Amino acid sequence: MRRISKLLVTIGMLLLVIAGAWRFVAPGQLVKYPDDLDKTVHASGTFTLYVDPATAAPQPSPTSFPLDVKRRIHVVESSTSKVVVQEDDVEKIGPLPEQNFLQRYVIDRSSLKNLAEERAYAYTTQNKIDRSPNYSINLPFDAGDGPYSIWKNEVGAPYPFRQDGPSVERAGLTLRPMHGRLEKAPVQGYYIDQLRSQGIPRQLTLQQLSPQLKAQGLDTQQFATQVLPQLSAADQAEIVSVIGQPIALNYLLDVDTRLLVEPRTGAIVSLDRINQTIYAQPDLAGMGRIQTILAKPEYASNTTVTGAEATLARLVRTPPTTRIFNIDYSQTPPSVADLASYATDLGDQINLVKKVVPLFLIIFGGGLTVIGVALSVLRRSDGRGRNTTTSEGVGGADATVPTRTD
């Protein structure tokens, strides 16, 4: 009995120690981004075009097309600490040519943040990108209310997400709404290069820009007929040379994003709504040379020239901004349900590691310890009882022995 009680206490205490060590060590070793993930997100919405693709001139009324987005996210390489994730986006916009956007991420499997890696790229394998230390395809395990910086591939920079409003119920899960917003963020050229098939240009001629410039007070026809003749032949020749060169376009982006996140796993279960607008601004730095010519002292008394100079100065400071297109889409309910099922399974695995196993070890180890102690107490109690009985029996026999008297 004594050996059994000691053994039970020893095993129980050992299990309790293991439970404590498990809670501190095991989650960091076992709770990781899956190495076999392969999921496709499906979303639908509207694509609205505000310019004529042939001329890049604003349309009197925008043209809208249905938008269908399929985004496959799948692991292509993994190790104990890293996972390489490929994102293949296929966007179908009405009758327009199908768009394929490729991204590759290298993710820390524990923190779920991007790592600085040569294997990571945006849109083309040649365009290496460092997204560290921001998030991309998943928020951290046990995600809170933020802020979390999520990388935006179109602008090559992160933007912050915070919880916006109370939790919501979707597909049987309680999800945390996270909201992020960007305004007039510069768009990367490598993204615009992907839009050539949609008629989105990288540069325009002055003639193509004439409608936008005229709306801002600079009539290029009047400039040619009324301002140029007021200048010297040399200045005219230089201005004609400048305006004959193509004008580069800078693109800007507005985006308003609402995600629904499962907190235990950090999984983005739903792209609840993404509303994104692209704008174009002409790079009028070259026009600054024309402004300098018009500002020469010899033209200071010519109101036609000085008026044109003032208009150019204003345009160089604040170029006209033209809305190009907008995409507005949300994840479909069946796709949300599919991602919710994935998040549930992953959450159950996390609970097994973080709660079920240590709780089992604590209960089982504590139970064995209690049983071992109880057996030890019973053994000692039983031993004391036997000693007492033996002592009383000897005393009685002595009392009955007759004594001799002489």
Image (spheres, helix red, strand yellow):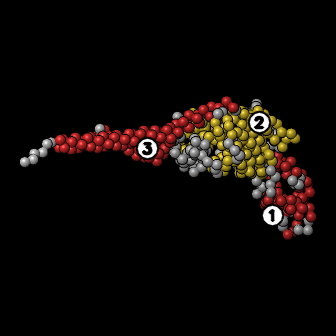
Outermost residue, front direction?
406
Disc number lying in front (2 or 3): 3
Image location (x, y in percent) of residue 135: 60, 47
* Residue type marked 1: Thr
User: Could you say which quadrant of the image residue 284 lies in?
Assistant: bottom right
Q: Which residue is mark 1?
A: 292
The residues bearing labels 1 and 2 have C-alpha atoms spaced at a distance of 45 Å
> Seen in the image, is 12 located left or right of residue 251?
left
Between residues 111 and 200, which one lies in front from this camera angle? 111
* Residue type marked 3: Ala
Between residues 350 and 369, which one lies in front from this camera angle? 369
> Seen in the image, is 62 located left or right of residue 24?
right
* Residue type marked 2: Thr
> Residue 324: in sight, yes or no?
yes
Disc number lying in front (3 or 1): 3
Q: Which numbered dot is residue 46?
A: 2
- Residue that appears at 24% across and 43% down: 392
Image location (x, y in percent) of residue 301: 91, 68
Q: Which residue is mark 3?
A: 19
- Cβ atoms at labels 1 and 2 below 8 Å apart: no
> Seen in the image, is 10 located left or right of residue 59?
left
- Residue that appears at 72% across and 41% down: 274
Secondary structure found at label 1 = helix
| Mark earlier in primary sequence (2, 3) | 3
| Mark earlier in primary sequence (3, 1) | 3
The residues bearing labels 3 and 1 have C-alpha atoms spaced at a distance of 77 Å
User: Could you say which quadrant of the image residue 378 lies in?
Assistant: top left
Q: Quadrant of the N terminus?
A: top left
Neighbor class of circle 3 (other Cα within 10 Å; few <14, some 14-19, many 20+) is: many
The residues bearing labels 2 and 3 have C-alpha atoms spaced at a distance of 53 Å
| Mark earlier in primary sequence (1, 2) | 2
